[in-house]
Amino acid sequence: MFLNSIRWRLQLWHGLLLVIVLAGFGITAYQLQRSTHLRRIDEELQQRVTVAGALARRPNEGPGRPPFEHFPPPNRRPEIPHLTIPEDQRLRERRGGPEFGGLDEPIPPRNSEGDSRAATPGLSPLERPRPPIDQPSFTQGLPPPQREVQLSPQALRLFEGTGSNSYYYVVWTRDGKILSQSDTAPAGVPWPGAMGVRNKNVSRAPEPIQLRVRGNQREMFHHTPMGDCILAGINISLDVAEMRQFAGLLLGAGSGVLLFGLAGGWWLSTRAMRPIKTISATAAKIAQGDLSQRIPVQGSENELDQLASVLNSTFARLDAVFARQAQFTSDAAHELRTPLSVILTQTQSVLTRERSSGEYCETLEACQRAAQRMRRLVESLLELARLDAGQALKKEPLDLGKIISECLELLKPLADERKISVHSVIASFSCVGDADRLKQVFTNLISNAIYYNKDGGEIQITAERKTDGATVIIADTGVGISAENLPCIFERFWRADQSRSHSDGHSGLGLSIVRSILDMHHGSIDVVSEPGSGSTFIVRLPD
Amino acid sequence: MKVLLIEDEADLVSSLARALREEGYAVDIAVDGADGLYKAENSDYDAIVLDVMLPKLDGWGVLQKLRRAKATPVLMLTARDTSHDRVRGLDSGADDYLVKPFDLAELLARLRALIRRAAGETRNVIEIGEVVIDTSGRNVTRGGSPVSLTAREYSLLEYLAMHRTKVVTRTMLYEHLFDEDEATLSNLLDVHVSNLRKKLGPEFITTRRGHGYCIE
């Protein structure tokens, strides 16, 4: 039951959609927050790696290339501008000049070798005073690399703090010995290892800064061309906790919104379903037989009103069809009653006493006439019933002109009897249809033209082919049909003079049968009439 | 008793008229409403049998117009049998309503009832002294023994009996006992009256000179 109910399915889909949307939103929000947070931390780490890099041994890389220049620039300029070595100072450094401007410049220890080297240009490499052990001696004419032992106070501030969430740095030599580390560094920070293979050649390009995550420790390190490793890190457990809290908040809020949304959706669907319930209740009543019921229409022209209108008009049509059926049945029975009463009265009357054979003959003849009438009526009724049931028409090629001519031949004697002259212009052409039934049509129309005509009158029949089909015109000079009666003549059992004596065999069904047959052929029949001068029937049959 | 039959169905008219005449009624016929109305307005009938579906003027129309002038009992004949049609008929002024096809016997019985009611009789049997007239069986007994009467004699007796204590003029008798097709000879009536006196007793029918006859 649940799965079949529209409302439950709606609710399910609605819930599913809400869950997906809320989940997507929540996850996106969380991820954004997280990545922003981490990125900020990473930037800080990068700065600190940069700063801590001052503790590493600087190689003599050749003219004009202090190590820091090749660092990949961080996304944001470091917030400590005074650490950046200005261009002119670098130049001074190269030249070996002793000017080290800026308070926070790494304090280079004086090295007499630099002076002596400059002072003794002529000496061969072997003769030059040897640089300190851990520095490669490929520098030419440049002061030996300067290394500092301690960061400036400003720099140190970056690494201070209490508790677990302060930044720290560690610097190792190329062999893994700790060169220096901050006070805040936790114990046992593993050495990231030697440089990667590709940098064995100690090229000019420095190592990129790599990220390492050890549980809650987020660290960034980088190998100098000399092989030293500088690492800056921070414990992000507090941040992680913060993010978890945020996630929890999102989850909670999301669930709340989901519940609220589901409740709201349920209420909305109830409201939407209410008119549908009304419609189905009314339809049930109608199904039980009360065809006069109609679905109330709000008048707001929404979709349900449209549905209601369509249903109402369908019910009205059904109602009309049933009413017509009932009317037809009642009319048919009524029509049969009259010949029946003739037979009954005739026979009952004749049987009250001894009669002469002549009287018996009269009675029998009257009964026969009545029976014939009933037979004609029953045939017409059956024909109409067949047409109503939509029994498939035969679709055979036929010559319309020939059919009309045949009907005319059959009825000519009747016309001659009343001195009615018939003029016909009938073209011979073929079309597709039910030959027998079309014969019925034209027999009826022509016999009507004869019957309702005046003695010595005329009948004009033309049959021709037009572009969209055949047109047959039958005109008579008869009594005509009044304008008010014109729309009624094709109705069942309708006769011009409602009380006209029935014994002439006209039951009032002829024209309705004609129209039914033509309808089935997708044709049409029209009539133009002038009371007193005559009527003209126009039959159209499409190809 | 004279009955007007207004019906357009030829085969029905012929057998009905014959049956009515054989019942002793004088029968006039009209085959359309206009003619029927004219006859009904201009003659006194004891009952009218009226079909609804008529040319020129249908049964309803005839009834409406007739009721302005006459109170003749009307029996309507029709193929329409819905309650609505019956109500309409009776409310329009018909006294009875019979649906086709009907049994002849029923029609005749209803006609008798209409005529009886119009004459103020409550029963089918009229007793005058020792003469007992059974109107449904159309037989007469006097002192217990049956009296044989011709159809005409019976009709005359029945009419006088139905209108007893009232003077019935010769004109009335002509109107009510002979239909329009019959030639009426003035002394035919006297013959019938004298025959009745012979069979039922000389005091039975009194003659009011200059007025008519009467059964006391």
Image: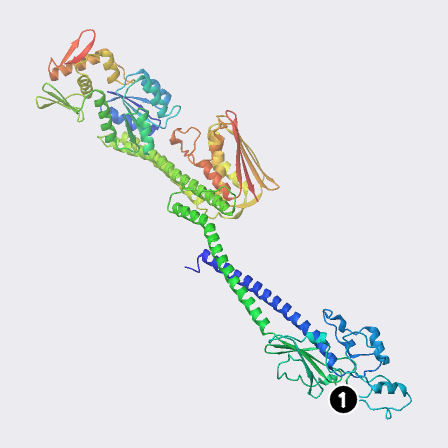
**Residue toward you, A250 or A314:** A250
SS of the residue at dot 1?
A: loop
Residue A349 in percent (x, y) is at 25, 30
Location of residue A467 by image quarter: top right
Q: Chain of mark 1?
A: A
Residue A418 in percent (x, y) is at 47, 28
Q: Looking at the rendering, in which quadrant would you find the N terminus of chain A?
A: bottom left
Query: How is the rendered protein coloured?
Result: rainbow
Residue that sits furthest to the left in the current view: B143
For the residue marked with disc 1, what is the amino acid? Asp
- Horizontally, is A528 left or right of A391 in the view? right
Location of residue B94 by image quarter: top left
Q: What residue is drawn where x is 65% and y is 72%?
A: A41
Location of residue A4 by image quarter: bottom left
**Residue toward you, B125 or A400:** B125
- Horizontally, is A405 left or right of A64 in the view? left
Residue A508 visible, this angle: yes
A101 w.r.t. A354: above or below: below
A225 w.r.t. B63: above or below: below
Residue that sits furthest to the top in the current view: B210
- Horizontally, is B90 left or right of A109 in the view? left
Pointer 1 local density, CA inside 10 Å: few below 14, some 14–19, many at least 20: few
Q: How many marks?
A: 1
- Residue at which label 1 appears: A134
A258 w.r.t. A121: above or below: above
